[in-house]
Amino acid sequence: MNKLRMRFSKTGRAIYISHLDLMATMQRAFSRAGSRLKYSEGFNPRPQISIALPLSVGTASVCELMDFQLIEEVDITSLVARLNATVPEGITVQEIYEPTRKNAELKWLKIEGVFEYDERSVDIMQEQLTDFFVRGSIVIEKKTKRGFGETDIRPSIREIAFTAGEDGVRVSAVISAQNPTLNPDLLAAALRALAAEIAPDFAKFTRIETFDENMMLFR
């Protein structure tokens, strides 16, 4: 069967499922749904299943993308229902379709989040956060495959805006999904490193939408 792509959400308690555990969870879901995944050939066969942008533990998403292949033909509509009957709470399969674009074309992510402050004024924090992120460069120390090095994360932030709310300062941003990847946690990390006086006491984020290089919806 041709490659299929699943769009799914990972929210609530499911945000604490690690990437490796999520892969195992989805494989079990297919098995319980009565659909057999295709395996690679060779000495160490692996199921043909991959997630475009692995999600950090603690981050929610309503736009995750997973590619997979099945051995036999299947009715996609019924497969969505059967998978939703087997996945754990917090994971919801939204749609399954045959992809027409490669994951390499995925460039931007829209994210939303909240910076929580226990004692500081959210109105003042909103103003100062806005001033901070209009900087031409935001250089922080970031872990890489070769260790730690200085990285300017500002080019990876296409848009960012802050709004004061009852639960904290709401964050809305469009950030680089890959080449390079910007983990939204680095937004708070940059504040802790460069402007501790406006760094949040707690930050949480949700992936909202995926786009290509030209900000067209990616599916």
Image (cartoon, rainbow, N blue to C red):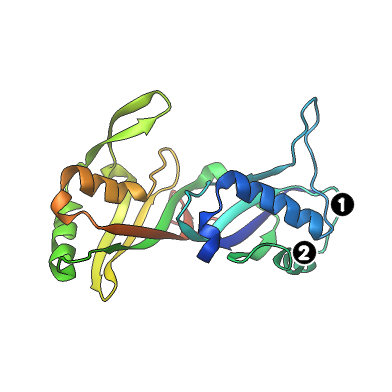
Label disc, if present, on residue 79 of the rendered structure: 2
Determine whether, in the image, residue 127 is placed left or right of residue 185: left
Q: What residue type is labelled 1?
A: Glu
**Image point (80%, 25%), residue name:** 43
Return the x and y of residue 104 as percentages of the image width and height.
54, 41
Determine whether, in the image, residue 208 is placed left or right of residue 20: left
Determine whether, in the image, residue 21 is placed left or right of residue 191: right
**From what the image shows, is residue 24 above or below residue 139?**
below
Upstream in the sequence, badge 2 or badge 1?
A: 1
Q: Which amino acid does label 2 sit on?
A: Leu
- Label 2 sits on a secondary structure element that is helix
Residues 162 and 179: in front is 162
Residue found farthest to the right = 72
**Image point (51%, 55%), residue name:** 16
- Residue 27 visible in this rendered orientation of the protein: yes
Residues 98 and 111: in front is 111
**Image point (37%, 59%), residue name:** 204
**From what the image shows, is residue 133 above or below residue 80?**
above
For disc 1, the marked residue is 72
Return the x and y of residue 46 as percentages of the image width and height.
74, 36
Return the x and y of residue 207 as percentages of the image width and height.
45, 59
- Residue 102 visible in this rendered orientation of the protein: no
